[in-house]
Amino acid sequence: MRVIRLPKGPTITFRVQQYCLIRDVVSQLKRPNMYASQFQNPPLLVLNNFNKDAMHMKLMATMFQNMFPSINVHTVKLNRIRRCVLLNYDPETNMIDLRHYSIKVVPAGMSRSVKKLLKTKVPNLSRYTDVSEYFTNAGALSESEPEQDGPHNEINLPQSIGSRGNMAAEKSAIRLVEIGPRIQFQLVKIEEGVCSGDIIYHQYVKKSEDEIAAAKLAREKKTSAKERRRNKQKMNVLKKKELKEKHKEKSLEGMQMKNQQEGNMDNDESEEVSKAVNVDDEDEDDAEYYRQEVGEEPEQGLFQKRTQLKRKKQHESEGNLKRFKGRKKKSVPASHRDKRTIGIARPPTHKASFKVKKSRSASKSSRKGRR
């Protein structure tokens, strides 16, 4: 178990020998005193046998005191003190015992019958003819739990407490009910920093001055090497950021060049449209000139054929330029290719066969010739 004071230390390391959980402690109590409102305020810290002159004892006591808020005795309100934490140091075994109690204040000097009347539940008085019999007949009450109050826990309250019967300047008894947990631990070592640094105290290991100086030198070398690695990592991070910025600038320049090229292409298209408009205007000018010179209307389609030929030549030139811009040719699927290039044989053509009938005289003459 480690107790650390942030942000610079020291660090106290303990070895836990025994412990017991809250549920285990509460399950052993006959009448546990557990309620939620007692955890709204910090507990009262009590240190026992920590008043030695040893440096590690003073440091432990200071660390435990700083774990809980300080209490001003003159301004504290007793209603807010509902719990108590006890730390007891055993010098023979060097063990520290931690106990956690709930504080209960009850009025002292009263019989059990009077205390029952002070509670919210009214006792059953049907067996008595008079109220005085209830107070005088103490044998009728249960005395299974004897009172443990005495001079060791009875005080005169300086302030009134919220529980019934506890008034200021009246005698009341203070009872402690354990609510857990229980921990028994032992001090092992104390380090100067946060889990690092010079070892101020060690329970088992004792070193000479030379060994302490060598350990300190090795630790300084380790911290310097760590600092160098850290600086190197920072330089690498800065270099990566610079490369990233340069790459970003290059990508932005490429995007600007691309936008300029697209703008030039748009200008070329607008020029083509303007050229087509100019050709139409020229056709109209030629038709007007023909009317003025000849005095007749030109034939229909006389000047349109010339403009159509110009447009056709322009489109052909543009198509040739686009064709040879370095684009890859698309592969034509096999289904669209010419069958002759694939090598598919054409279906055979059947020749028509005709049989010629010979006359009887011709057949006879042929037979005689054979003979």
Image: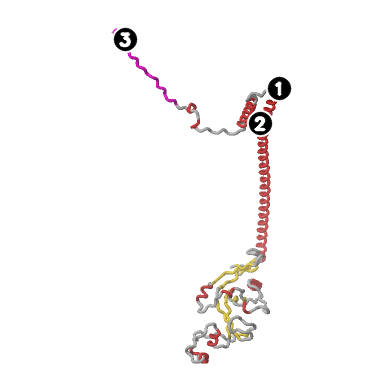
- Residue 208: horizontal and vertical position, in percent? 65, 66
- Tag 2, which secondary structure? helix
Image disc number at residue 293: 1
- Residue 217: horizontal and vertical position, in percent? 67, 61
In this rendering, would 181 be left or right of 209?
Answer: left
Image disc number at residue 276: 2
Is residue 359 covered in magenta?
Answer: yes
- Density class for disc 1 (Cα within 10 Å; few <14, some 14-19, many ≥20) is few
Q: Give the range drawn in magenta.
A: 345-368
Q: Which quadrant of the figure has residue 230?
A: bottom right
Residue on which disc 3 sits: 362
Q: Which quadrant of the figure has residue 347?
A: top left
- Tag 1, which secondary structure? helix
User: Is 282 situated above or below 197?
Assistant: above
Q: Which of 76 and 217 is in front in this view?
A: 76
Nearer the observer: mark 3 or 2; the answer is 2
Can residue 149 be seen here? yes
Q: Which of 216 and 320 is in front in this view?
A: 320
